[in-house]
Amino acid sequence: MKKQLVVVGLLLCGLVFVAAIAPDDSPRVAQVVALDECDPVTFNAPTGVGPDFCKNIALGFSTTFQTLTSEVAEGNPDKNWDFEPDTLKVKEGTLISVVDQGGEPHTFTEVKQFGGGFIPPLNGNQAPVPECSAGFSDVAVAKTRILQGSTSLVTGLSKGTHYFQCCIHPWMRMKVEVR
């Protein structure tokens, strides 16, 4: 019996040692959340974006279409329309999972520098960045679209700093630092 316990103990120690030195091959995942507070009544009205565009079901505060466009025109877009976190620091090889928990579609588009998107009234005084300027007619932008309630994965980011923004709501911005 004593011999069996020693053998079992040695096997367990060996397994613990192998687990400790084995490389971690499992991919890391970092989550990003796209948020907005669109008011379904005003966004879905004919004077807004149109029927069935805003699918916000959150209870509480919401932003009317008129308020959002006025705030953008004044150079003060709604800070509650955002990517969270604002800055993400990850190891190379990390998958970035971007989930749209807002009521509107967004994009999570990598850009060289922040700027305007493809909807001029939402740009404030910024010119569209080249990566966004063609809108959804550019397949590269269309592939970054995230519909309400859906998730998109970003993979293969190289070491360094990467900038992402929504090409629809260009004040929604995020910096990803890969080390």
Image (cartoon, rainbow, N blue to C red):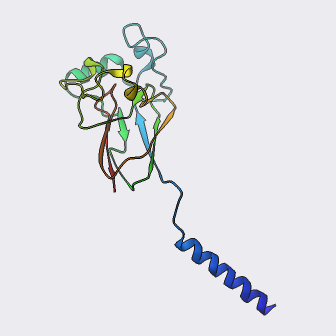
> Which residue is located at x 63 percent, y 75 percent?
15
> Which of the two residues, 4 or 88, is positioned nearer the viewer here?
4
> Which residue is located at x 54 percent, y 73 percent?
20
> Which residue is located at x 31 percent, y 16 percent?
66
Q: How many marks?
A: 0
Q: Which corner quadrant of the image does residue 119 belong to?
A: top left
Q: Is residue 38 left or right of residue 162?
A: right
Residue 82 in view (yes/no) = yes
Q: Residue 88 at what x, y percent from top left? A: 35, 49
Residue 37 in view (yes/no) = no
Q: Residue 103 at what x, y percent from top left? A: 45, 26
Q: Is 25 located above or below residue 14 in the figure?
A: above
Q: Is residue 117 left or right of residue 93?
A: left
> Which residue is located at x 35 percent, y 50 percent?
158
Q: Is residue 8 left or right of residue 59?
A: right
Q: Residue furthest bottom?
A: 2
Q: Residue 12 at what x, y percent from top left? A: 67, 79
